[in-house]
Amino acid sequence: MDRQPAWRRMSRFDLPDLSRRNLLIGGGIGVGLLVGWQLWPRQYRANLPLAKGEYGFGSWLKISRDGSVTVAIPQSEAGQGVYTALAQIVAGELGADWRTVAVQPALASPEFANTLFAREWRSALMPAGLGALANEDAIDGLGDDWATRNAFMITGGATSIRQFEEPCRLAGAAARTLLCQAAAERWDTEWENLETRNGFVVFGKKQIPFSQLAEAASSFDGPDPVPLNPSPINALSGKEMPRLDVAAKVDGSANFAGDIRLPDMLYASVRAGPTGDTTLKSIAAKGISKRKAVVDVVKTDGWVAVLGTNWWAANQALDAIAPTFETVGLMAETASMNEQLSKAFSKVEGAKIFDQGSIDAAFDKSSGTRIHKALYFTAAALHAPLETRTATAQFQDGRLTLWMASQAPQSARAAAAHAIGISVDDVTLIPTFAGGSFGRNLDSQIARQAAALAKHSGRPVQVIWSRPEEFMRDFVRPPAHARMTASLAAGGVVTGLSVRIAVPPFAREQMQRISGDGAVEAMEKTAGEHDPMAIAGAIPPYAIPNLSIAHYPIKLPLPGGILRGGGHGYTAFFIESFIDELAHESGVEPLSFRMQMLVGQTRLARCLTGVAALANWDGGASGSSKGIACHSMQGSHIALIATATTSETGVKVERISAMVDCGRLINPELARQQVESGIIFGLAQALGSSTDYESGMPTARRLRDIDLPVLSDIPEIEIEFVRSDAEPGGASEIGVPAVAPAVANALFSAAGVRLRELPLLSKGL
């Protein structure tokens, strides 16, 4: 491991020329510059490329002669604002002028390993049963070491700020001290007497711009440890700074994978059969005999592609050749999968994820308690990002270059390398913006296809999946069934709660695919393994003395994957809907029913009382059309009240009010955007976003088939944040889980019908 100062061991990398199309500038002036920094003290070789006139300060940032500061961002930008938030932390600690700040995707490095994700998802990443062999600290240490050694760069689980706030602060602070040292040498004073402000080093009435100090500063050895600002709130952190990606997206200069244009490039449309033991049997070759735009047809065992001079022609030709596939074994069928889920509780060995007290004693009817039971269901949920999976690949001189959006770039590189038999070191992945993701871009199927087609054709190839192909290949959030049982004592006291959830171990399956397995291999490897992440959020925040949470890891012929909100997306629906049932069964107002059980949950309790005042909570009595729900995840808390009614056309949600505690906010407006988008995503999950399956095929083919809410369906949304000095929590997913139960509870108060299935169905209303 190289421990020399990073600025003395810069290495060269081949990268495309920097331009406004791959660089985002805060001040609106394209200057083509990049800045980078890493944790202090530095332990890994800095891999940040430098152009003439640029001076690097490690892996995180560099400063140019004109004073521009560019921050390397290791996370995928899919609209959540991570480019802005991380740059804001670095620039604020540095004391930079926001108008001169730019960002660029970071290259792979152990410095950018997402160790927090590895820790929080360790149960899905590590072999089943490992937790019984070591204590929590040992497992966390193993996860950190594994993530670092494998440069485990991943975007997901609302970890970006939580993982990288401290490294970003250290990066900015370290560069600040070096600039101050360079200025102090000029002024013959101690560097500790200096400060930085708006792109200048300042000493009394004297000031020097960063541009005049960058070259000298890059040669200094900084202090150890690096002195941070006395408060996490610096000149920029906590303020609503303009997003860095907006201007490029408005003027069209922002690059998505489908925007890449290379000389002599071909376009490919692909089609595969149902998941499982599927083989391509035949194509109607005559279907393309007179199509001039078609260049080639490429057949593999599992899929077929048409290469053309434009994508539309390739896709039309693909329809014309009418590929036929044969699948051996079970295929996904909604009816049979529901039957399997229902039988899982008696045929599958459940694994207790949480066990407290004695459920058997709590359910003893001789004690005078009442037992209340309910069954809940959720259908398979699609990711359905606006941008279907897209990748552009060029294979030249034994090296592959990929342009694509990926939440797991190292996995994509490995998948592409394996597909064409080259070393991972010979694959360069250039990240692009993502047109939405919600977990979809964790998978790398398209990287394999793009690599194979580029090598086969000898020309650059852009692969774009059609919407039907996107739905066919989607690793859905799988269907789930829950059996809820509670015991109620006099006065509405919940003495016991049993939550049993049957769902495939999709989080473990997802992590297996990231490790390099295909869909079928991942399903086989994880079949029957318990998966705490698959039922994340099932442990309620309430003080219930006897509590049992169990996972029944059923195997379904349907590949599963992580969707925005993860397991919380349905476990919150199960828990918060059932708690509402218990409140009405006990004759206790739903808010009071929850508050009496929130022992020690002061932040969540504050959200509940806050949203009650915000939404003029009326108790959710019959005919009020208001429903309440709350949830905690990823260090954040939310309470939500929905106003909803039913009509001949279905469910109409009129208003959603939310009180949110995400801890200390880096950029309040970004946090608001994320919570609001999460609420809308949760609304989509509540009312649509699902598909049935017939003969292994999704019945949904187009976006119109999954009942996504359109603009006229979006209710009035009001969000307030609890002011907090707590560590930042996740903001990108906290808005999702509580929406469905709040809407379901509102519909019960409106119509007196308890809906226990997602999406919420209009039948019977």
Image (spheres, rainbow, N blue to C red):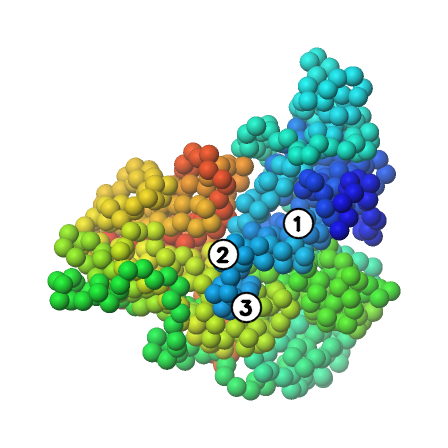
Q: What percent of the width, then of the height, locates residue 719? A: 41, 40
Q: CA distance from mark 3 to mark 1?
A: 24 Å
Q: Residue at x 75, y 81 (%)?
A: 289
Q: Residue furthest top?
A: 205
Q: Amino acid at mark 3?
A: Pro
Q: Residue at x 40, y 63 (%)?
A: 353
**Which amino acid lies under the numbered mark 1 shown in the image of this protein?**
Phe
Q: Earlier in the sequence, mark 2 or mark 1?
A: 1
Give the crowd class for mark 1: few <14, some 14-19, many >=20 residues within 10 Å: many
The 10 Å Cα crowd at callout 2, few under 14, some 14 to 19, many 20 or more, is few
Q: Disc 1 designates what residue?
A: 112
- Let me know if residue 83 appears in the view: yes
Q: Quadrant of residue 516?
A: bottom right
Where residue 729 appears, as percent x and y from the top left, is 48, 44
Residue 72 image position (x, y, % from top left): 70, 44
Please say if the residues under marks 2 and 1 sit with CB atoms less than 8 Å apart.
Answer: no
User: Looking at the image, can residue 587 be seen?
Assistant: no
Question: Residue, x 44% and y 45% (percent of image)?
Answer: 636
Please tell me which of labels 3 and 1 falls first in the chain: 1
Q: How many marks?
A: 3
- Left or right of 466? Residue 430 is right
- Where on the picture, by quarter, is residue 459? bottom right
Mark 2, residue position: 136
In this view, the mark in front (3 or 1): 3
| In-image side of 36 versus 163 (left or right) | right
Type of the residue with mark 2: Glu
Q: CA distance from mark 2 to mark 1?
A: 23 Å
**106 or 5, which lies in front?**
5
Give the CA separation, mark 3 to mark 2.
15 Å
Q: Tell me the residue that label 3 is attached to.
A: 127
| Residue in the image at 77% along x and 75% along y | 296
